[in-house]
Image (spheres, rainbow, N blue to C red):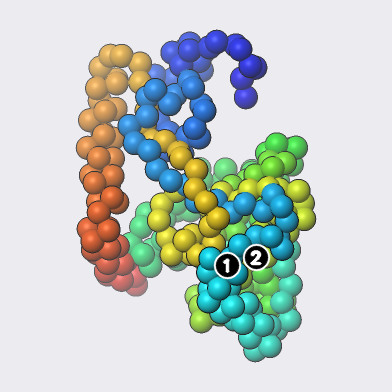
Amino acid sequence: MLAPGLGLKAAELMRACALSSFAFDNLEAGQGLFTPHAAAEYASYVIDVEKGYETYESVLRAQSPKFLKTTLAKERRLGRQVGELRFVFDERDPAALRTLMGWKSAQYRRTGRRDRFAQEWITRLVDALSVTRAPECSGTLSVLYAGDQPIAAHFGLRSSTVLACWFPAYEPGFAKFSPGLVLHLRMAESAAAEGIGLLDLGRGAAEYKDALKTGEVPVYEGAWSRPGAGAVLYWLSREPSRRAHHFVRNRPRLAAAAARALKGAGRLRRP
């Protein structure tokens, strides 16, 4: 975080960091150093629990009564049929994190997307963040158990006021109970109890985000590059695919067709 009134320019910061380019895809509004270099604006979906979980639940009851009633009923049924439910907001067991990574990798492959946890540096980074404990940056692993069995989990980063949602996943065998939705409700409840006011679900449309959200905030995608041959090469390697992705995402029919194609590719890749 820069001191107020520092007056630093993007080029100066990048030079001090020995960087020739810096790409961003979830830049918050108000980040004046880089917003002039934004190429596209997106909505990031958020859950506001600043006034407490009960207030959030009352909002859901008003805007999505069927969703809330159905999800709570599934939660009760999950507890009866599988095992007594237990939720841990800040789980420290490394085995639970490995379970989440396994679920998420399978989900990426199942939906035809690149498996982020197949990249060693991402796994190492998540491992390091999971044991990071600082007032404004702590790794947080949340797990929903049925009996002693993990059913759904999420890993993200939290500050004193915001929980950034990164990697949610669940055991597919329990999909009929919507364990991912139950997990998010318990995360919202525990976050509010911890004094966290906002859960940021991230950009990108998804049915579960539409059901859970209370609002949206703008985020930006773009890049800063130092003028020169490197900047040209970087632009050629990233910008065409970024524009194609943006074009498809903003057209629901194309986006739905692309999602079906990815899932088909995922099925073909499965052993």
Residue that appears at 57% across and 67% down: 62
Q: Which mark is residue 253?
A: none
- The local crowd at label 2, few if under 14, some if 14 to 19, many if 20 or more residues have their Cα within 10 Å, is few
Q: Residue at x 36, y 65 (%)?
A: 111
Q: Secondary structure at mark 2?
A: helix
Above or below, 34 against 243 in this view is above
Q: Amino acid at mark 2?
A: Ser
Residue matched to label 2: 58
Rendered residue at 65%/89% (across/down)? 81
Left or right for 80, reference 110:
right
Name which residue type carries label 1.
Ala
> At 67% from the left edge and 53% from the top edge, which residue is drawn?
49
- In the rendered image, residue 65, in percent from the top left (x then y), is placed at 55, 73
Quadrant of residue 271 in the image?
bottom left
- Label 1, residues with CA under 10 Å away: few <14, some 14-19, many ≥20: few
User: Which residue lies most toward the front here?
Assistant: 62
Distance from disc 2 to disc 1, alpha carbons, whole Å, reads: 6 Å
Q: Nearer the viewer, residue 60 or 44?
A: 60
Instruction: Choose between 83 and 1: the one closer to the eye.
Output: 1
Residue at disc 1, secondary structure: helix
Q: Nearer the viewer, residue 219 or 100?
A: 219
Residue 241, picture quadrant: top left
* Residue 189 coordinates in the image, percent (x, y): 71, 61
Q: Is residue 70 left or right of residue 250?
A: right
CB-based contact (under 8 Å), mark 2 and mark 1: yes
Of the pair 231 and 254, the residue shown nearer to us? 254
Question: Dividing the image into 4 quarters, which one contains the N terminus?
Answer: top right
- 2 left or right of 116? right
Q: Which residue is disc 1 drawn over?
A: 62
Q: Is residue 152 visible?
A: no
